[in-house]
Image: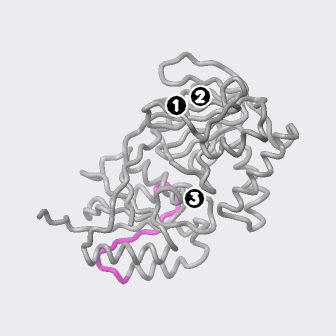
């Protein structure tokens, strides 16, 4: 029987992550007591790149991430943009209580951060076969103003960008975080759509070209592209059937039967109301090219201003990443 390769764990700690407001020192102390673990505190993408370069020299093959979606995005970007590792490490994303960490909620370790970390250490020590890896596509996002692409797992614009701003300015500052806070923002924006309250949410003109198709400009209420299977609160608002790696969903400026369609649409269940004629479109795609005339976009929780970009933002397939499950 083949022997399992020696496991070397590298732990990225982001002390600024919302989930690390409590219990951060306990996580760091627990990891420090394990000789098989090397850990680094990171706050910026350059910190992450430097830490991963060091991990590669130490032959780390399991990357543990103690941070939110932005930390995972920075790690994926550093891994895919650089040739640090001969073989890309498996990613073990710790749960991130208190923040809307969709990546951790979809393909992260389960339980509390400390219990997930202890379970990981037990797996390393006992060499049992309880762990599996899930292969998941990664988004490659080329922003015209940036020399190198950014890699992540969730892209959203129009109302998603507006809701993200609202969440950071109005909800998160009041101490309501995590999936509850995101749910509050969703409810507020859904109500604004029903009332057609343009002070809260408004459609924006976007020129979009999918795959090899010609680009068309329309007003959109929402556009999202993701490789996740579930978003916050277990939502999965995509129902494309094509054998392509990226989920794409768009809602037009004036969606019909919005109140009736919303519950099924948010669960990815298409019915007689959820169709292009009523303003609801979903496909699985290889690439989307977007020219944003106003506003910006959300990439894994990080907000980008796309006004006056000298060309389209291109969201495509960036490769596969392995996520550890226990």
Identify the residue at the far left of this view.
1
The residue under the point 30% across, 52% down is 88
Identify the residue at the far front of this view.
272
Above or below: residue 87 compared with residue 308: below
Residue identified by numbered label 3: 101
Q: Position of residue 167 (x, y in %)?
A: 73, 54
Q: Nearer the viewer, residue 59 or 135?
A: 135
Contact check, label 1 and label 3, Cβ < 8 Å: no
Q: Determine which quarter of the picture holds residue 224.
A: top right
Q: Nearer the viewer, mark 2 or mark 3?
A: 3
- Position of the C terminus by quadrant: bottom left
CA separation in Å, label 1 and label 2: 6 Å
The residue under the point 66% across, 41% down is 265
From the viewer's perspective, tell me whether residue 39 is left or right of residue 169. Answer: left
Residue identified by numbered label 2: 290
Q: Residues within 10 Å of mark 2 (few under 14, many from 20)?
A: many
Q: Residues within 10 Å of mark 3 (few under 14, many from 20)?
A: many
Q: Determine which quarter of the picture holds residue 97.
A: bottom right
Residue identified by numbered label 1: 314
């Amino acid at each position: 029987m083949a022997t399992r390769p020696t496991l070397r764990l590298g732990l990225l700690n982001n002390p600024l992550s919302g989930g690390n407001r409590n219990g951060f020192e306990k996580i760091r102390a627990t990891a420090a007591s394990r000789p098989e673990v090397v850990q680094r505190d990171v706050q910026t993408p350059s910190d992450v790149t430097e830490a991963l370069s060091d991990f590669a020299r130490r032959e780390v093959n399991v990357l543990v991430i103690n941070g939110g979606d932005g930390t995972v995005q920075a790690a994926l970007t550093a891994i895919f943009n650089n040739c640090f590792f001969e073989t890309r490490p498996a990613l073990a994303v710790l749960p991130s209580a208190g923040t809307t960490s969709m990546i951790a909620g979809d393909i992260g370790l389960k339980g509390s951060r400390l219990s997930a970390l202890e379970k990981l250490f037990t797996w390393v020590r006992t060499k049992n076969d309880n762990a599996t890896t899930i292969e998941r596509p990664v988004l490659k996002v080329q922003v015209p103003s940036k020399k190198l692409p950014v890699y992540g797992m969730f892209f959203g614009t129009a109302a998603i960008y507006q809701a993200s701003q609202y969440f950071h300015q109005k909800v998160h500052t009041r101490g309501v975080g995590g999936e509850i806070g995101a749910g509050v923002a969703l409810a507020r924006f859904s109500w604004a759509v029903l009332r057609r309250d343009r002070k809260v949410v408004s459609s924006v003109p976007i020129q979009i070209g999918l795959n090899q198709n010609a680009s068309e400009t329309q007003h959109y209420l929402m556009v999202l592209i993701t490789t996740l299977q579930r978003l916050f609160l277990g939502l999965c608002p995509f129902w494309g059937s094509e054998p392509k790696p990226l989920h794409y969903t768009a809602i037009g400026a004036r969606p019909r039967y919005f109140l009736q369609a919303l519950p099924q649409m948010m669960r990815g269940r298409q019915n007689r109301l959820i169709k292009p004629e009523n303003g609801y479109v979903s496909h699985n795609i290889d690439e989307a090219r977007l020219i944003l005339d106003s506003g910006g976009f959300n990439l894994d929780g990080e907000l980008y201003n796309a006004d006056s970009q000298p060309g389209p933002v291109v969201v495509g397939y960036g490769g596969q990443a392995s996520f550890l499950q226990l």
